[in-house]
Image (tube, grey):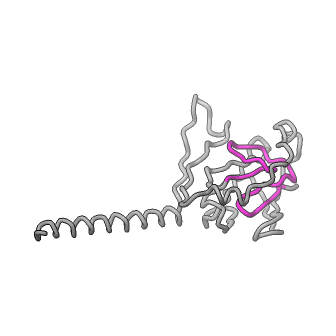
Amino acid sequence: MSELTLLILRIGFLILLWAFVFAIVYALRSDLFGQKVRRLPAQNGASAASAPPAPAPAPAAAGSATARTEAIAPPAAAAPAPTAQQVADEPVARRLVITSGAKEGMELELGEDQLTIGRSADSGLVIRDDYTSTHHARLMLWSDQWMIQDLDSTNGTFLNGKRVSIPTPVPLNTPVSIGTTTFELRR
């Protein structure tokens, strides 16, 4: 081989090596710090206060989530989710009680503000396990009802055994599962 060919191959491998290094640094940065949550503008002239916010993008996790989701998915024979009218007739919950998981027994007072749940240190409820995303879910008070919203997490958020895909009302004493942690809203 000529010296020119060897020089071009060396430079090519060096560029490829640096591309891999930058890809790894980018993946680590997004996994550690997450992506910024952006508010979407109100659509069709509706104010942001009149509708629950749209789901914010969450960082993508590496690896296959299928096996992990199957390992933690609640049983299929769960009771049906309550209707919005049933939830509206209940009093507003004032505390969140963790019923299973690493922080079992912990109680958290709920105010008027939304509560972000995830692995990130800036979350209102920090859950550190392998099945929880950086910004996993959001609990928000909307029209005197607590709503749970999954933030496009890898393993999902379950309300009474059913996966949540849109903002859903959370009735009192109904289990909500995020990763290996389960909590309930109580008065």
Q: Tell me, yes or no, whether the highlighted magenta stretch contains residue 176.
A: yes
Q: Which residues are magenta?
A: 156-185
* Image coordinates for residue 4, horizontal then vertical, percent: 11, 67
Classify residue 167 as left or right of residue 1.
right
Q: Is residue 25 magenta?
A: no
Quadrant housing the C terminus? bottom right
Whole-percent x and y of residue 138? 68, 52
Residue at the front extreme of this rendering: 1
Q: Pick the residue in front: 90 or 104.
A: 104
Q: Is residue 63 left or right of residue 79?
A: left
Q: x and y percent of residue 143 in the render?
A: 76, 41
Quarter of the rendering containing residue 5: bottom left
| Above-or-below relation of 166 to 128 | above
Q: Residue at x 83, y 69 (%)?
A: 105
Residue at (74, 55) in percent of width and height: 73
Image location (x, y in percent) of residue 34: 53, 60
